[in-house]
């Protein structure tokens, strides 16, 4: 019996993780493909006139088994992978891609879809039905339905190779991250690190088989504190080089040829479909609409932030020299000296704040925020099966006790989990013909683990990360649309970061922090003066932070705005692309592209600018809350009804204007960042 193929008999029909084995995935995929093809044949062979119901709605519901198989598989591949799962992925991903192409390039199926599209004005469809029809029609056109047979075959080959390369990219990165360990024999090597980080390094060494020593890895909770606090400059450099040379050392885990080939294939694909570049293809379905809008947007922020960023680095260099530091500030020096300067300037650092941010309290804090804004309640439910013992499971209800969602939270790093933080779903929301399916939402992070003497105490950056991912989760949990493919986070990519980024703002507000920021030993609420210091220091080195973000956006657009076939040296290409926003000296042998998962494995190709774009939206939107009270239920309801619940059922700018009353301007963001 394959549990994936059966109706889940678990609480809330959640994934039966404990029953699913690796060997279940490929058979479930094969059966999902078989059933999907059977359903497509029924649509095509229907002799009745093509209608919304027998074509578009039937297509929406044609791949239920396949969808749930892929959701579980790819989520585990990111959060709890192993060698066997990664081998299965090499077969799983191309087969799934091939099926997607079989459907998307099916000429007879497209004839049916086009027949419905051509008579859409006479069908009395509501706005959501029309959007689903439009999304399907455009998707087929944008993915080759109008190509001749030769063109379709070329597209199939490109897509299958891209899916394999994307897996190879991620696999190489994870192996690079897992294989590096810096074992330290002397506690002197950890000089400068807070006691909690020294204890964590000792615990990590013990876990890795080096008891009595200390260890640092490339997992963020290990990497970031060492780069921020370790006084030993040579060790900081060693760690920086290990992280900066991930998958670009010319060995079997090198990604240089992988990314070069991926960029070439994406360009070929766009040209085949009649677009100037991959960026032109991608941005057609974004708020930005075209590459020129994006480059103008980035240039505008670059011009506003560059002078301030240069001054910040000059001041930091001067400060370092005055305090016995180097006269040639390098990338491995920045975090260390910036943290010292910030502490001197604002009398604040993460070590002062961490005791007030016990993980369990911060979780309770975001739950209280969700309750105050949207009336949600979170109740722990250990009856739900988990894919790892660290995962926390909750039922989410509204004020009337109605079931709203299932929520999974997975917080600590481990060997089978990729770096970073993300939100995902195991089941989307839908409500067709009175049959309501509520969503199963998950957030995955890599936070500081508890030690033998301390609970998990978060840095303020980790606090804002939790708020960020929880904002995405709210977008998924509060979805209220008819069709799953239009619900929750199924929106334009430069709009998807609004719900996440706006929630970060609450973490800076006293009214919010007073709810949960309590000293883990004494229970003392975080002092007002410390909150003020958080706010005062919020724009510290904002110019440099803006330039750093823009440099990533420029790199993304460079890889995807033209033909990269002639690139002979990806490292040189990368440095040229990022040069307008670079402030510190280049470091030979290092690259970002070879581990830039967002654009080569995470769906953000030609879309990394979305973070900055959404900042404009979130700053403008949060000003509305600030002016009327950050827990103003009326405004929160307006935000929920017009943005969080609506998914991709309307154009995002129309949704935003319904919430805010007007289009946003960059002014609120520039004010918040101290750039005007």
Image (cartoon, rainbow, N blue to C red):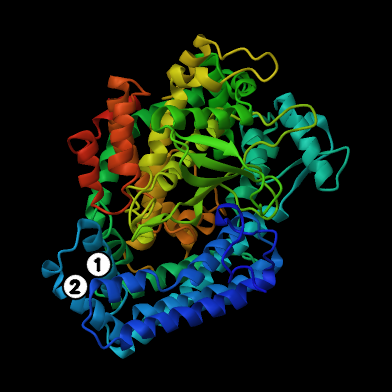
**Residue at image coords 32%, 47%:** 495
Position of the C terminus by quadrant: top left
Left or right: 87 as drawn, with respect to 575: right
Image quadrant assignment for residue 381: top right
Give residue 117's mark: 2
Distance Cα–Cα, label 2 vs label 1: 7 Å
Where is residue 370 drawn, in percent x and y? 45, 32
Image quadrant assignment for residue 627: top left
* 259 or 500, nearer to the observer: 500
Give residue 133's mark: 1
Disc 1 packing (10 Å; few <14; some 14–19; many ≥20): many
Q: Against 499, is 591 above or below? A: below
* 356 or 174, nearer to the observer: 356
* 45 or 83, nearer to the observer: 45
Q: Against 38, is 65 above or below? A: above
Where is residue 25 drawn, in percent x and y? 62, 71
Q: Is disc 2 in contact with disc 1, using a CB cutoff of under 8 Å? A: yes
Where is residue 231 drawn, in percent x and y? 68, 28
Disc 2 packing (10 Å; few <14; some 14–19; many ≥20): many
Left or right: 663 as drawn, with respect to 32: left
Q: Residue at the far left: name it.
A: 122
Q: Against 663, is 195 above or below? A: above
Tag 1 secondary structure: helix
**Residue at image coords 66%, 54%:** 387
Q: How many marks?
A: 2
* 148 or 6, nearer to the observer: 6
Give residue 454's mark: none
Q: Is residue 675 visible?
A: no
Looking at marks 2 and 1 on the same chain, the residue that comes earlier in the sequence is marked by 2
Position of the N terminus by quadrant: bottom right
């Amino acid at each position: 019996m394959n549990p994936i193929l059966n109706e889940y008999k678990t609480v809330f029909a959640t994934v039966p993780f404990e029953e699913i084995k690796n060997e279940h995935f490929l058979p479930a995929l094969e059966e999902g493909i078989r059933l999907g093809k059977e359903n497509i044949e029924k649509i095509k062979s229907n002799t009745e006139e093509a209608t919304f119901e027998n074509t578009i709605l039937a297509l929406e519901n044609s791949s239920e088994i396949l969808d749930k198989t892929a959701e579980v598989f790819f989520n585990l591949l990111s959060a709890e992978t192993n060698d066997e799962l990664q081998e299965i992925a090499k077969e799983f991903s191309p087969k799934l891609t091939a099926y997607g192409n079989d459907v998307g390039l099916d000429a007879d199926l497209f004839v049916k879809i086009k027949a419905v599209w051509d008579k859409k004005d006479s069908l009395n469809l509501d706005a959501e039905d029309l959007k689903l029809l439009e999304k399907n029609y455009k998707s087929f056109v944008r993915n080759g339905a109008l190509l001749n047979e030769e063109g379709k075959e070329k597209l199939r080959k490109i897509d299958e190779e891209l899916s394999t390369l994307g897996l190879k990219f991620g696999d190489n990165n994870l192996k690079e991250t897992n294989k590096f360990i810096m074992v330290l024999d002397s506690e002197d090597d950890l000089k400068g690190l807070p006691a909690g980080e020294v204890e964590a390094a000792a615990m990590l060494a013990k876990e890795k088989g080096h008891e009595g020593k200390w260890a640092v890895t490339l997992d963020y909770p290990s990497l970031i504190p060492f780069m921020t606090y370790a006084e030993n400059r040579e060790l900081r450099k060693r760690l920086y080089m290990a992280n900066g040379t991930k998958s670009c050392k010319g060995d079997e885990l090198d990604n240089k040829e992988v990314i070069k080939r991926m960029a070439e294939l994406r360009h070929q694909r766009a040209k085949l479909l009649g677009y100037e570049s991959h960026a032109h293809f991608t941005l057609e379905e974004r708020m930005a609409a075209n590459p020129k809008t994006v480059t103008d947007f980035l240039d505008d922020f670059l011009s506003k932030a560059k002078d301030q960023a240069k001054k910040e680095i000059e001041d930091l260099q001067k400060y370092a020299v005055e305090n016995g530091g180097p006269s040639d500030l390098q990338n491995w020096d920045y975090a260390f000296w910036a943290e010292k300067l910030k502490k001197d300037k604002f009398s604040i650092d993460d070590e002062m704040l961490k005791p007030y941010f016990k993980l369990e309290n911060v979780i309770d804090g975001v739950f209280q925020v969700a309750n105050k804004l949207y009336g949600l309640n979170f109740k722990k439910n250990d009856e739900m099966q988990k894919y790892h013992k660290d995962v926390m499971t909750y039922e989410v209800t509204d004020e009337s006790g109605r079931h709203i969602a299932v929520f999974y939270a997975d917080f600590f790093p481990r060997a089978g989990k990729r770096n970073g933080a993300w939100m995902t779903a195991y089941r989307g929301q839908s409500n067709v013909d009175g049959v309501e399916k509520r969503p199963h939402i998950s957030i995955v992070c890599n936070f500081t683990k508890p030690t033998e003497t301390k609970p998990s105490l978060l840095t303020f950056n980790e606090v804002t990360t939790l708020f960020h991912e929880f904002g995405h989760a709210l977008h998924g949990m509060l979805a209220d649309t008819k069709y799953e493919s239009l619900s929750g986070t199924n929106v334009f990519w430069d709009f998807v970061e609004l719900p996440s980024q706006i929630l970060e703002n609450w973490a800076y507000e006293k009214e919010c922090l007073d709810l949960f920021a309590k000293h883990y030993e004494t229970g003392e609420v975080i002092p007002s003066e410390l909150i003020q210091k958080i706010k005062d220091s919020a724009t510290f080195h904002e110019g440099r932070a803006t330039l750093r973000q823009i440099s990533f956006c420029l790199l993304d657009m460079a890889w995807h705005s033209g033909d990269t076939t002639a690139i002979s040296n990806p490292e040189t290409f990368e440095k040229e692309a990022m040069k307008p926003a670079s402030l510190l000296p280049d470091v030979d042998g290092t690259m970002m592209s070879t581990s830039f998962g967002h654009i080569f494995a995470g769906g953000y190709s030609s879309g990394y600018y979305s973070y900055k774009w959404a900042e404009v939206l979130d700053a403008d939107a949060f000003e509305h809350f600030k002016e009327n009270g950050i827990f103003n239920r009326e405004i929160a309801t307006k935000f929920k009804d017009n943005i969080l619940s609506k998914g991709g059922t309307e154009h995002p700018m129309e949704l935003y204007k319904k919430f805010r009353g007007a289009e946003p301007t960059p002014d609120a963001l520039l004010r918040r960042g101290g750039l005007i």
